[in-house]
Amino acid sequence: MRRILFYCILLIPFTLRAQPRWHVETASITFEIKNAGFPVRGSFEGLEADIRFDPARPGRSTIVASIDASSVRTGIGLRDQHLRGRDYFDVQHHPQIHMDCVRIEKTESDAFTGLFRLQIKEVVQSVTVPFTFAPRGRRGRLEGHFALNRLDFGLGGPSPILADDVLVRLEVGVAQAE
Amino acid sequence: MKYKSTLLLAALVLLLVGVYAGHPVRSSDTSAASFSPGIPRTWDSTALATVMLPLVDTSVTVRPLSEEAYYGLPERVIYKSYPLYAPGYMPAGYFDSLRQREPEIAFVPATIETGGDWIRAGELVFDAPHAFITVDSLVEHVSFPMVAREIWRQVGMPLTEDGIMPFFRLVVREKGKVEIGRFACGMCHTRVQEDGTLIKGAQGNYPFDRERALLEPMLLRFQQGLNPDEAIGQDQRVLFGAPWITHASQAWLDSLTVEQFVSAALAIPPGVLARHGAHLLHPIRIPDLRGVKDRRYLDATGLMRHRSIGDLMRYAAFNENADLLTRFDDFIPALGRHEGPLPPLDSLGFDRFTDAQLFALARYLYSLEPLPNPHRYDEATLARGTHVFIEEGCVTCHTPPFFTNNELTPVDGFTPPEDHFETFDLFDLSMETDPSLALYTRRGTGYYKIPGLRGLWYREALLHDGSLTTLEELFDPRRLEEDFVPSGFKGAGVEARAVPGHPFGLELSDEDKAALIAYLKAL
């Protein structure tokens, strides 16, 4: 029994090594929500991510990411300030938005579905993120999207004009770490 | 094509919003059917306990007049009143014919039967003055013709097409004596358009403070034994005193001279008012009362909640006399520092509307809707304006159908206490406008109310202090510069100043700006 355990421990580094590690080169985190029937688009910056992902063996992947909540931009300064306040992201108390994957499954060639835990403020919810990963040599591009209900995360209150559903798009250029 | 589809979409959304949002207060019954209302008790201590927002300085204990003291005030009698014509327009023998008339009480509750009757009776209350001066002599040596010649002409008193000054009414309370009645609700809430059209309930354009600047020193000049500076200072402390506030504008009241008073009051344009509880240096834009039934807060600082018609009655009573008799710790505006019981209030000249009069007034105000703009804009422009209104985010605060979300925004320098988020309707973002009115006056709550935009086309004082008079100025980025010359309230001795805050629509293209302005003027 001890011997089996010993071999297992020895194998762990090889298993991890088998998952290529990627660092973020470019990132576009955008969102869209309808206000009075018209789309309002916004973005976040400051993506930090630990991506260990092998398209051939996605089931063993781990992705942990966070963005700077105060980086929210919609093109109107005072509105952004409101979004940073307690009614929405409350960045003073919750400076970051976190996301980490529970599991990833391959659906087609270069297409995957990830189940992620998304934490905004104190609320953690599962979100399903369909995404593609297109490798080009040691670089790759990850593109995905998901929808969330802003009320589930305490982002504002019920509104006769602001929709509840928010569409989030992720476009991340990555390069394989040495 | 793009804008046509935009307009259709926006119209649909705005229609749905209208259905969803509903009215905070039910509109008036204007039918001719018999109507027996349950008249709310105006000065109800339970309702009063929660109707007002706290002051910025919560260490000050605010105690409104007691029910007993309020209902002990003499009831106001509303007499039939008559228009006052400007010199040159008065029909021949007009004053003489009025001198022949018997006094006639106009507000008689027993004659009010239908919803329409209540509204008509409310209009009488709206127009009912409660300060009177005879046409022969305002005080000794100061007659109506003299005031008309030396003051009203100078301040540019607006006149209707018939030459009527609708801010005043002539009243016969005693046969043979014709009096000019002042201080009706309509004095500040009546507007005469440039073409002489009258809009009752709108943001008024009676040049109240400019008249005061000229009239009050004139009256003082003829009163023996008074130190004019002291007398002026005393009056202004009654109106604007808030001794717990440690701002320079309060200290300014303590050493006020007639000259300073005149300069400050002359600087306040029509549409703006140094209303009691505000300040000569921090005046308030006069609100448009049309559409008031749909507003959750009353006053530019959201001083009073509007939960029912009873609250509107309370607000009217508060602004008639009750503010001046409210205790702020040991300060009562009408009396200064005062501890112990109040002296007999009728001896101080105070009276009150009856509950029925206030109910009728509130019914009348509920019946007033914003008027449609007679000027028509083309559909393409309006469609584009709708798009800009939404895209620029205006719709978030100025939400249809009332074009306000009925929320309060904290001003710079005020952090809402935690319990306010549960109790009041807050939009937790400062618009970065001048906070003085909300911080340094006894109407100061730390908030400004988000105004409704319906009827914007007939308003001339914009922002809470009327700094600007046109939407073109509001959307002009140059207003943020120190050398900008605002067309509205600037302040005494100020030639140019920045008008900060509300930084929306400043970077629009000329076309989008024009479309947005057209859209706003069409609301």
Image: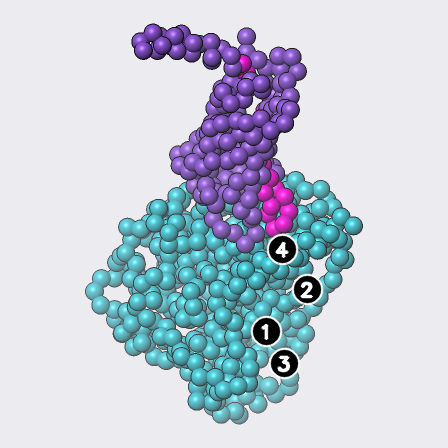
Query: Which hue is chain A drawn in?
Result: purple
Q: Which residue is mark 4?
A: B13
Whichever of callouts 1 and 3 sits on the residue coming sooner in the sequence is: 3
Q: Amino acid at mark 2?
A: Asn
- In the image, the segment drawn in magenta is A20-40
> What's the distance in space between the residues labelled 4 and 2, CA to CA?
22 Å
Circle 3 packing at 10 Å, graded few (<14), some (14-19), many (20+), is some
Kind of residue sitting beneath label 1: Met
Q: In the rendered structure, find residue B165 and report the number of the disc placed on it.
A: 1
Q: Secondary structure at mark 1?
A: strand
State which mark lies toward you, 1 or 3.
1
Q: Earlier in the sequence, mark 4 or mark 2?
A: 4
Q: Residue at x 34, y 49 (%)?
A: B419
Q: Which mark is residue A106?
A: none
Q: CA distance from mark 1 to mark 2?
A: 24 Å
If you read the primary sequence from the N terminus, does the residue marked by circle 2 or circle 3 appear first?
Answer: 3
CB of mark 2 within 8 Å of CB of mark 3? no
Helix, strand or loop for the magenta stretch, by majority: strand
Mark positioned earlier in the residue sequence (3 or 4) = 4
Q: Which residue has dot 2 on it?
A: B373
Above/below status of B521 relative to A69: below
Looking at the rendered structure, which numbered label has been put on residue B90?
3
User: Is residue B90 depicted above or below B186 in this figure?
Assistant: below
**Residue B121 in view (yes/no):** no
On screen, residue B10 versus residue B185, left or right, reads right
**Which residue is rendered at x = 28% and y = 50% of the image?**
B59
Give the chain letter for cyan: B
